[in-house]
Image: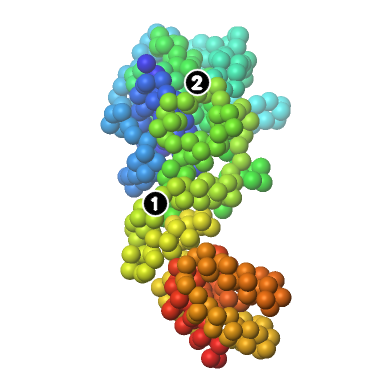
Amino acid sequence: MEITRFAPSPTGHLHIGGARTALFSYLFAKANKGKFLLRFEDTDQERSKEEYVDSILNSLDWMKIKLDSEPIYQSRNIARHKELAIELYKKGFAYACDCSEETLTKMREEQIAKKQKPKYNGLNRNKNIEFAEGMVLRFKFPLEGESKFKDLILGDITINNKEFDDFIILRSDGSPTYNFSAAVDDMDMMITTVIRGDDHITNTLKQINVLDALGSKIPSYAHLPMVLAESGKRLSKRDGAEDILDYKKKGYLSDALINYLVRLGWSYGEEEIFSLEKLKKIFDLSDVNSSPSKYSQDLLNWYNNKYLNFLSAEELSIKVKENSGIDFSEIDNGNLAISLLAKGANSINQIAEESIYFFEEPQIKFNALNIDTNKKLLFSEFSKQLNEIDFEKSKIEKYIKEFLQANNLKFPELGKPLRVILTGKENAPSISELLFILGKETSLKRIEYTLDD
């Protein structure tokens, strides 16, 4: 049985990259009838905050990513980590180091002067110093050969062991370091596959060596290429790297965001639309691209528009009311109005913002239309004839077409100012649909207000 984990540090909110990692880990576990676990790597006591724990949990809940057990808090396992660090020291896989900060600084400076990679040079590796309080414990990284693993996405990863140094596993204050704690927790949680960003490849090779020294089974690893901004640079908040819950506040649907995130580097034939339930059956890491993906606001908007239009008018009304307080049930043809707005909307918030003309009279003065005053007569005739027809959508469409032909007009000559008269906006839905939804009385009232100017 596959067991995966998502291991964020609660030092900030969940963003696009982390959300995608969590989603892929969850889907891989579910597709393999396994378990998805959550571990908060909260050993940085200064920066770790409860508000970020809550925010991450709320984000995962909104994305419908369900945990198969209660979250693990790394800070509660420190005694276990220290115990195993001492055990590795006693078995000869780690050694005590009493190098002062001055010694380490001098070491780095000399290496930089020689144009060498700054790293610990193994000064105390073979001195057999007896470990005492205030010292650090360093892992005895193999001196010869290579560290390697077969990545489930990137293929064979190999780095010469000379590139590594004897990294610290226990600090001078007795606290364990990230790479040691993560390795121990993965072992204790019986993680079978670790899915995370490709910025962790070096950490993975360190952790593999730690797990090997602990006599643990080594998990499989899958490193996801980064999500970049459209410019090709690292994602910034301006490019979309914001709190996942901000997308909820902006009126994005979780189903749309999930569909968008899964398509950042993963594909399944020519399909574009996937429900979470289907993804839990078909997701496979072999379908993940080994190249970085680029964030696209336009594509996210496209997905959200699709999912908005999958909803019924009643479902849309509930969501709009929850987000904005606007209640489409208060107006005539409310269901038709909200469905019309959803056709061109990128978000629930946009539906709310665009809906104002269904609830309030725009009251447009004729001179605001920026058209010749002699067109007043034309609109007066349009209004008069409109009053005579049955207000059915097909008949409204037929009437508009006939009116344009009879007066030798192109549609924008009538449609553009009429749209402003009816809505107060230059960009609005189909004129015939607008007239039908607003109804004869309201439509004529708005036209007459403008013509009476």
Work out whether 263 lies above or below 117.
Answer: below
- Which tag, 1 or 2, sits closer to the chain's start? 2
For mark 1, what is the residue?
312
Quadrant of the drawing holding the C terminus: bottom right
Q: Nearer the viewer, mark 1 or mark 2?
A: 1
Residue at 28 percent across and 31 percent down: it is: 70
x then y, percent, for residue 1:
37, 16
Q: Position of residue 368 (x, y in %)?
A: 60, 83
Amino acid type of the residue tagged 2 in the rendering: Tyr
Whether residue 232 can be seen here: yes
Residue 326 visible to an observer of this rendering = no
The furthest residue to the bottom = 453
Percent x, y of residue 185: 37, 23
The x and y percentages for residue 326 are 36, 66
Tell me the element at label 1.
loop
Q: Residue at x 60, y 9 (%)?
A: 144
Q: At 71% from the left edge and 28% from the top edge, which residue is drawn?
A: 115
The circle drawn on residue 221 is 2
Task: Give amino acid for label 1.
Answer: Ser
In the rendered image, the vertical position of residue 79 relative to residue 416, given as above or below: above
Residue, x 53% and y 58% (percent of image)? 344
- Between 416 and 368, the one nearer to me in the picture: 416
Q: Nearer the viewer, residue 185 or 281?
A: 281
